[in-house]
Amino acid sequence: MESLVFKLTAYLHDVLGISVSAMAWKGVFSMPLFLREQYRFYLIDMLDTSCLLMIANSEEELTPATVLKQWKAAGEFWPDEIIYVTEVCSAYNRKRLIEHKVPFIVPGNQMYLPMLGIDLRENFKTYHAPKSSQLSPMSQLLVMMAIKNELLDGKSPSELAKLLGCAAMSMTRAARELEGMELVSIYKDGRKQQIKFNAAGKELWQMAKEKMVNPVRRRVWVKSVPEHWQGLLAGESALAQYSMIGEPKYPVYALTSSDWKSISRNMAVEEITHPESGCAQFELWRYSPERLAEEGCVDRYSLWLSMQDSKDERIEMALENLMEANAWQ
């Protein structure tokens, strides 16, 4: 088992250029016995995404139907992404897993992670970008930066990767995705590939808005906010700063899943199931809210996306006024 974990981390480093540490998941004992006997469960943080690895114990190949059923069962105990990992999987069964939309990794052979826009196969010789009507978190972050008038045109994927502190391959994948959605053009200047957004400001927002996803992966309640911790305001707390709407009863903050893990581990933040006096709400974001922050708040575009489904008329009106009052670049 440890050998397969080592192969997995080495495969991720070789293919995506990222280093991950796999830690045994302590919540495994909350799972039913049939899952604990069939799999080992490890946690990794990959490309700003918290993932639970569901690693097959047996070298005997499981049927895709069995994997799908057990993957769904595991999802009852873990709220974020779950990845099936196996050392043996035939081409036919890999095809069936893809049809079932089950994320999986066969170290050294194939990686299918639709939530991250990754489909690498046949010893990663060919890149296959799954067609999607929605932007991946990295692509969305780039679009947001462009809307906010950051100078990205003329930069190469590797230059953008250094700017955001991510793997060059992740940025190349994001650029190809944006090109496929006709939001950017990719051209060559000598040997250097460069990107150019096909619109700017309000026009780019209108072009991309329907392809964007809610930046909030999930929300958690915490008993109290750590002393001296300066969080980034989100949700109704941020909306109150941008508009005339009143402050919410409980403050709302935004952070990434990895930041949440660090805070909960190092600052002993206690998660609770329901709001109570003195508590706060943490939004765990798909991309770093800090990169787009505006004076201690999440940016207004991401804020709009995170709250657009609200049925509260006060919030609907405040969001409408927020975008109307925006000084488009």
Image (cartoon, helix red, strand yellow):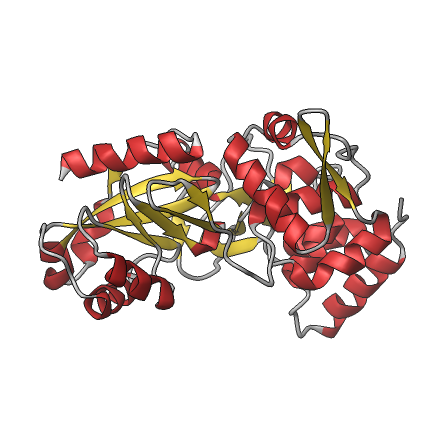
Q: Choose top left, top right, bottom left or bottom right for residue 5.
A: top left
Q: Is residue 245 left or right of residue 106?
A: right
Question: From this viewpoint, is residue 282 visible?
Answer: yes
The image shows residue 105 at horizontal and vertical percentages of 30, 48
The image shows residue 214 at horizontal and vertical percentages of 60, 58
Q: Is residue 183 left or right of residue 82?
A: right
Q: Nearer the viewer, residue 267 or 17?
A: 17
- Quarter the N terminus occupies: top left
- Quarter the C terminus occupies: top right
Question: From this viewpoint, is residue 234 visible?
Answer: no
Q: Is residue 299 left or right of residue 286?
A: right
Residue at 69% x, 54% y: name it.
Answer: 303
The image shows residue 308 at horizontal and vertical percentages of 68, 65
The image shows residue 171 at horizontal and vertical percentages of 57, 37
Q: Nearer the viewer, residue 240 or 287?
A: 287
Residue at 55% x, 30% y: name it.
Answer: 228
Asked if 238 appears above or below 11 in the picture, the reply is below
Residue at 11% x, 63% y: name it.
Answer: 34
Q: Is residue 108 left or right of residue 126?
A: left
Q: Nearer the viewer, residue 301 or 132?
A: 132
Residue at 73% x, 66% y: name it.
Answer: 315
Query: Which residue reaches farthest front?
Result: 190
Q: Choose top left, top right, bottom left or bottom right for residue 36.
A: bottom left
